[in-house]
Amino acid sequence: MKDPFYFPLYENSIKTVVIMNGVTNISSNSFKYCSMLKSITIPNSVISISNSAFEGCESLTIKCKSGSYAEKYAKLNGIRYQLIS
């Protein structure tokens, strides 16, 4: 069963996301089944990412700064990442 806040209209159209600085959390199912999502840029302000935030995003690359929470999350969850300056 899919999440009640799941929006199939967007699942195959989102390709790139830039999270604005100041955002601190990426919650459960935020990008669930966004199969076309190729990259997401996550600022240092993000200090919490749910384990299911990127479920089904097989082609995802997280763009983040070295030492950030996003880098640690990517390593722990086997998600490709690219360090940015």
Image: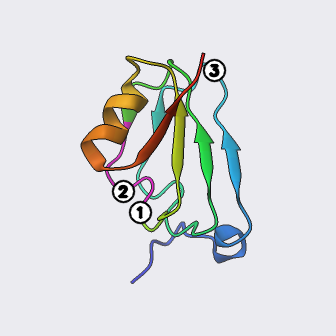
- 34 falls in the magenta region: no
- The answer to which of 31 and 74 lies nearer the viewer is 74
- 51 falls in the magenta region: yes
Tell me which residue sits at (44%, 78%) in the image. Answer: 2
Check residue 13 in the rendering and tell me which mark sits there, or answer none. none
Left or right of residue 58: residue 34: right
Q: CA distance from mark 2 to mark 3?
A: 21 Å
Q: Position of residue 69 (x, y in %)?
A: 37, 25
Task: Report the residue marked by disc 2.
Answer: 52
Q: Position of residue 36 (x, y in %)?
A: 64, 66
Q: Evaluate if marks 2 and 1 touch, with contact meaning CB atoms under 8 Å apart.
A: yes
Task: Report the residue marked by disc 3.
Answer: 21
User: In terms of secondary structure, where does tag 2 sit?
Assistant: loop
Check residue 55 in the rendering and tell me which mark sits there, or answer none. 1
Left or right of residue 54: residue 84: right
Q: Which residues are magenta?
A: 49-54
Going from N to C along the chain, the mark reached first, 2 or 3, is: 3
Note whether 13 is above or below 31 in the view shown.
Answer: below
**Principal secondary structure, stretch drawn in magenta:** loop
- The answer to which of 37 and 66 lies nearer the viewer is 66
Q: Quadrant of residue 8?
A: bottom right
Quadrant housing the C terminus: top right
Going from N to C along the chain, the mark reached first, 1 or 3, is: 3
Q: Evaluate if marks 2 and 3 touch, with contact meaning CB atoms under 8 Å apart.
A: no
Q: Amino acid at mark 1?
A: Glu
Q: Amino acid at mark 2?
A: Ser
